[in-house]
Amino acid sequence: MSGNWGGTVTFPDGSFAAAFALTQNGTSVSGGYADSGGSGAVSGSVSGTNTVRLNLTGYPDIPLLTFAGTVDADVNRWSGTITQFSGVTFTFTRR
C-alpha cells in the first residue's frame, strides 16, 4: 500500500476527489489523507491477502472515519466503503 493514491469518494448525491499518502510496514499502514474539505492522519492494517482498513482522525468536525475495502491482486486499485455512512463508497488507484 505504500505510495500516493488518488481517487473518488462517492455519496448518494455526488462525489469528490481525495488522496492518500501511505506507508506500509508489515501489516501496518499509516500516512495522511486530504480532500477539498480538509485533511487528517490515517492508520490501519492490511489483513489476509487483500483487505485494507484505515482509520482517519483529525478531519474537520468528524472524529473518526473508517475506509474499509479490498485491493486488487497488483495492489494498484483499492475500493470499498466508509463504514460510518450508509451508501458511501470509494475507489482509489496508486499514482
Image (spheres, rainbow, N blue to C red):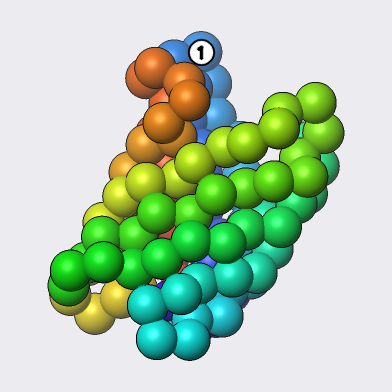
Residue found at x 45% / y 34%: 82
Which secondary structure lies at badge 1?
loop
Where, by quadrant of the figure, is residue 37 drawn?
top right
Residue 14 appears in the figure:
yes
Which residue occupies the foreground of this view, 30 or 90?
A: 30
Percent across and percent down for residue 33 are 67, 56
User: Going 49% across and 41% down the picture, which residue do you hit?
Assistant: 66
Q: Name the residue under label 1.
A: 13
Residue 50: percent from the left, percent from the top? 22, 66
- Looking at the rendered structure, the number of numbered marks drawn on it comes to 1
Residue visible at 50% across and 72% down?
Answer: 29
Q: Residue at x 59, y 70 (%)?
A: 30
Counting from the top left corner in percent of width and height, residue 61 is at: 80, 26
Query: Residue 43: which quarter of the image?
Result: bottom right
22 vs 78, left or right, is: right
- The image quadrant where one finds the N terminus is bottom left
Q: Which of 18 and 58 is in front in this view?
A: 58
Q: How crowded is mark 1: few (under 14 residues within 10 Å), some or many (20 or more)?
A: few
Can residue 77 be seen from the camera position used here? Answer: no
Task: List the single residue furthest toward the bottom.
Answer: 25
Amino acid type, label 1:
Asp
In-image side of 9 versus 42 (left or right): left
Furthest toward the top, the residue is 13
Q: Where is residue 25 in the image (x, y as percent from the top left)?
A: 48, 86
Q: In this view, does 89 lie to the left or right of 23?
A: left
